[in-house]
Amino acid sequence: MEQVNYQQLKAQITTILNINPDIKVYGLDEEVEKHDSRSIDENLLSDECLRAYYWAINYLSQCRYTKGISFTSPINVLQLSQDISNWSSTEIPEGLVIVALKRLNKEFYKYQGDVVTNVATKQKLYNFKKSNSEFYWKSNIVKYSSLKDEMELILKENQTLCTNGMSASLEYRDRESLSEPIGLKQYYWSKAWLSNCIFIKSFTMGSYGLKHYAENWARNYICNGALIAAAIHKGIDYKPLGGPNVLLPISKKTFGKKVDACGTVTDYDTFYNGVVPESIQFV
C-alpha cells in the first residue's frame, strides 16, 4: 500500500494556484486576475480535493498524449474528469484535472467554451494501474513494508534494474539491496526529490548526474538504481542509454527555482542548506 502525504499534495496545488488563480473547482474562471493569490479557491485544498488531485495525477501520468491538440475531435477537461471519476471511483472536479495537467506540464487550451487537451483518444483504461493508497497528514512516519511492496513490483517489471542502474554488468548487478532498508530509504528520498522537479518533453539529464542533486538535497547517499526506480514508480518517461544510466525529461529550471521536501518554493541556497525532514522515522 502506497502512503500519500496530504501536506505534499497541498503544497503542490498551492504553488500552482498562486501562479494560476483563475483555476477553480469547476474549471477556469476568466474573470480572475492573474497572479492574484488572494483569489485562490480554498475548496481545492480540502482533504477530499487533495485525494481527487492525487488520482488525477495517477491517471494522467499513465495517459498517452498527441504532439498537438486536435481541434476536430479534442478531449475536453469535462470528459477527462468523468473518465478519471469512473476509473478511481472518486468524484474528480474539472479544476483538479487542470491543476494536474499543469503539474505534469501538459497542454490545454480554452476552445469554444471548453478546456481541451492533447490526451490521446481510445485509452485502454482497464490497463491503467490504480494503487492502494493510504492518505495521512503526519509526515514523520514511513513504513518499510509499503516501500518494499512498491520496489518488488518495480523489480519484477524491470529485470535489469539494480543498484547501479539499468543493464549494469553482471558482476555489478545487485538487485537485493534495493528491497532492503538501506535501498528503500534511498528510493523514498528519490521519490520525494522527483516530486519537486520541473518536467519537460525532451530527455535532457542523465540519472547518474541527477542522483547527486538528490543526494545534496536529502543529505543521504542515493544509488542510481533507486533514483531510476522512483522515476518508474512515478510514471516518468526515461530514455535508455545502453548502460546503467538513463535520460530523464527534467528541466534545468529545476535547479534555479528550488522546492523543499514539503513543497515550499525557496531560493537556491535555502534549498541545499535548509532543513530536510531528518526527523522521519522508517518503521
Image (cartoon, grey):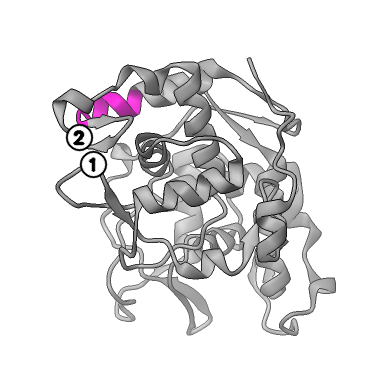
* Residue 154 horizontal side relative to residue 52, left or right: left
Few, some or many C-alpha atoms within 10 Å of disc 2 (few <14, some 14-19, many ≥20)?
some
Q: Earlier in the sequence, mark 2 or mark 1?
A: 2
Q: Is residue 194 visible?
A: no
- Give the labeled residue for mark 1: 244
In this picture, is 167 found above or below 245? above
Q: What range of the chain is rendered magenta?
A: 153-160
Dot 1: what SS?
A: loop
Dot 2: what SS?
A: loop
Query: Which residue is at 53% across, 64% downward?
Result: 254
Find residue 168 and name its label.
2
Few, some or many C-alpha atoms within 10 Å of disc 1 (few <14, some 14-19, many ≥20)?
many
Q: Is residue 111 visible?
A: yes
**Image location of residue 204, percent across then percent down:** 33, 65
**Image location of residue 138, percent across then percent down:** 76, 30
State which quadrant residue 255 falls in.
bottom right
What's the residue type where badge 2 is placed?
Answer: Ala
What's the residue type where badge 1 is placed?
Answer: Pro
State which quadrant residue 8 falls in.
top right
User: Among all residues in the image, which is located at the extreme right?
Assistant: 38
Q: Are marks 2 and 1 in contact (CB under 8 Å)?
A: yes
State which quadrant residue 226 falls in.
top left
* Residue 68 horizontal side relative to residue 111, left or right: left
Query: Which residue is at 77% across, 64% downward?
Result: 41
Query: Which residue is at 51% across, 55% downward?
Result: 81
- In this orientation, which residue lies closer to the viewer: 261 or 273? 273
Predominant secondary structure, magenta span: helix
Q: Is residue 155 magenta?
A: yes
- In this orientation, which residue lies closer to the viewer: 77 or 281? 281
